[in-house]
Image: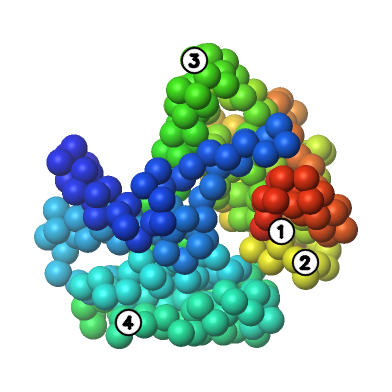
C-alpha cells in the first residue's frame, strides 16, 4: 500500500520534463473525433505513460518490503514496450532489464531505439520468431521453479515490465479518467454522460485498463476493440470464440501483430465472476487446441465491447484523408482505431 505522499513523489519524478508538453496527455479534436495523445514521452510510445512510473513504484515497493535482492525485469515486446521499458529502467539502482523482441517483427526505428539504449543495466535481445514466441518464452521462465530457485540463490528476483505486471495497467487506467474530465471541462460533455472509446488493440492491455476504468465508475457506452488484420479479438467479441489457428500477418501496425492476447485472460476472469477453474480450462484449451469458446452467460457480459478490424489499405487511406483535411498525421496503429 502506497501513502499519498509516496504516490505524489513517484508521480512528480515520472511525469516531468521528459514529456514535451506540461499536460502530458493532451486531447486533440480532428474531424469530429477526439484523440488522446499518448506519444509525448521520451520514447514517443504510449507505453511511456506507464513505464515512466513503474520503476519508481517497484523501487518504493522493494523499500517497503525491505527487499535486498536485485530485481531482474524480463520483458517481451512487439515494438513499443521495449524502448519505453529500457528507458524507464535505465540506471535504476537494484535492477537489470532484459527485453526480448522478434527479429523482423518490429519497425526499424523501434529496433534501433532498443539496440542503442544507454545504460549498464539494460539489455535488448532479438529472437527468431514473433511476439507470441517472445511472450511465451518469458512466461515459461517465470513459471520454471528450478530456474527461479537458482536465481534466488544468486540473490536475484524476477519481475516484468509487460502487462503481466498489474503495475503496468494501473497507470493506464488513470488517463481514461483524465480524458473524461478534460471533455467535461471543455464543455464537450456533461458529467455522467457516456462516451465511446476506441482502442487500437493487440495484447489487450490498454483496452483492459479502459474496462477497469468503466468498472470503477467511469461513464462509458461502448469499448471499441480495434484490430488490424490479425483480428482474433474482433472475431472473439463477435462470436465468443477465440481461435488463434491462423497465420500471423505482418502489417504496418506491427505492435498489434499478435495472435495470443495475454490480457484477455484477465477479462475472462472478470466476466466469469472469478471462476478460476473455468478460466484455467479455457486457457488450457487454447494451449492444446488453439481455441476456446466461452459460455452464453459470459458472452452476455461482453455487451460493453464492440470488435472491429481495419485492413491495411483502409488504414493507409484514413491516414491520407485525415492529413489532407486537417494536416494531422496519424500513426498506423491510431489509424486502425
In-front residue for pair 201/14: 14
In this rendering, position of residue 259 left or right of residue 144 = right
Which residue is labeled 1 in the image? 332
Name the residue furthest right.
Answer: 313
Q: Earlier in the sequence, mark 3 or mark 2?
A: 3
What is the x, y in percent for residue 69? 20, 72
Q: Earlier in the sequence, mark 1 or mark 3?
A: 3
The label nearer to you, 4 versus 1, is: 1
Q: Secondary structure at mark 4?
A: loop
- Contact between marks 1 and 2 (CB within 8 A): the answer is yes
Q: CA–CA distance between discs 1 and 3? A: 32 Å
Q: CA–CA distance between discs 3 and 2? A: 39 Å
Q: Secondary structure at mark 2?
A: loop
Which residue is labeled 4 in the image? 119
Q: Earlier in the sequence, mark 2 or mark 4?
A: 4
In this rendering, position of residue 203 left or right of residue 119 = right
- Contact between marks 3 and 2 (CB within 8 A): the answer is no
Which residue is labeled 2 in the image? 251
What is the x, y in percent for residue 294? 72, 39
Which quarter of the image is occupied by the N terminus? top left
Labels in figure, total: 4
- Contact between marks 4 and 1 (CB within 8 A): the answer is no
Q: Which mark is residue 191?
A: 3
In this rendering, position of residue 39 left or right of residue 246 = left
In which quadrant of the rendered view does residue 203 lie? bottom right
Q: Secondary structure at mark 3?
A: loop
What is the x, y in percent for residue 256? 68, 60
Amino acid at each position: 500500500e502506497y501513502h499519498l505522499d509516496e504516490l505524489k513523489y513517484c508521480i512528480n519524478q515520472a511525469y516531468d520534463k521528459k514529456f514535451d508538453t506540461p499536460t502530458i496527455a493532451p486531447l486533440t479534436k480532428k474531424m469530429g473525433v477526439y484523440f488522446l495523445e499518448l506519444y509525448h514521452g521520451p520514447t514517443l510510445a504510449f507505453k511511456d505513460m506507464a513505464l515512466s512510473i513503474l520503476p519508481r513504484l517497484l523501487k518504493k515497493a522493494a523499500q517497503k518490503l525491505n527487499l535486498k535482492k536485485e530485481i531482474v525485469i524480463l520483458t517481451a515486446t512487439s515494438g513499443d514496450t521495449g524502448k519505453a521499458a529500457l528507458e524507464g529502467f535505465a540506471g535504476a539502482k537494484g535492477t537489470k532489464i532484459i527485453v526480448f523482441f522478434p527479429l523482423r517483427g518490429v519497425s526499424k526505428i523501434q529496433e534501433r531505439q532498443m539496440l542503442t539504449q544507454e545504460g549498464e543495466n539494460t539489455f535488448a535481445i532479438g529472437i527468431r520468431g514473433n511476439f507470441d514466441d517472445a511472450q511465451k518464452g518469458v512466461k515459461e521462465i517465470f513459471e520454471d521453479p528450478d530456474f527461479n530457485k537458482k536465481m534466488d540463490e544468486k540473490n536475484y528476483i524476477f519481475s516484468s515490465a509487460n502487462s503481466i505486471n498489474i503495475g503496468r495497467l494501473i497507470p493506464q487506467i488513470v488517463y481514461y479518467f483524465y480524458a473524461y474530465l478534460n471533455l467535461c471541462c471543455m464543455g464537450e460533455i456533461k458529467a455522467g454522460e457516456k462516451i465511446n472509446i476506441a482502442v487500437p488493440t493487440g495484447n489487450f492491455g490498454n483496452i483492459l485498463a479502459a474496462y477497469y476504468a468503466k468498472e470503477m465508475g467511469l461513464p462509458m457506452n461502448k469499448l471499441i476493440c480495434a484490430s488490424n488484420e490479425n483480428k482474433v479479438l474482433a472475431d472473439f467479441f463477435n462470436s465468443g470464440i477465440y481461435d488463434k489457428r491462423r497465420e500471423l500477418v505482418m502489417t504496418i501496425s506491427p505492435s498489434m501483430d499478435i495472435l495470443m492476447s495475454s490480457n484477455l485472460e484477465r477479462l475472462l476472469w472478470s466476466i466469469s465472476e472469478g471462476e478460476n477453474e473455468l478460466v484455467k480450462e479455457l486457457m488450457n484449451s487454447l494451449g492444446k487446441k488453439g481455441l476456446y469458446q466461452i459460455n452464453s452467460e459470459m458472452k452476455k457480459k461482453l455487451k460493453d465491447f464492440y470488435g472491429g478490424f481495419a485492413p491495411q489499405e483502409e488504414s493507409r487511406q484514413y491516414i491520407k484523408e485525415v492529413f489532407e483535411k486537417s494536416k494531422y498525421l496519424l500513426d498506423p496503429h491510431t489509424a486502425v482505431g
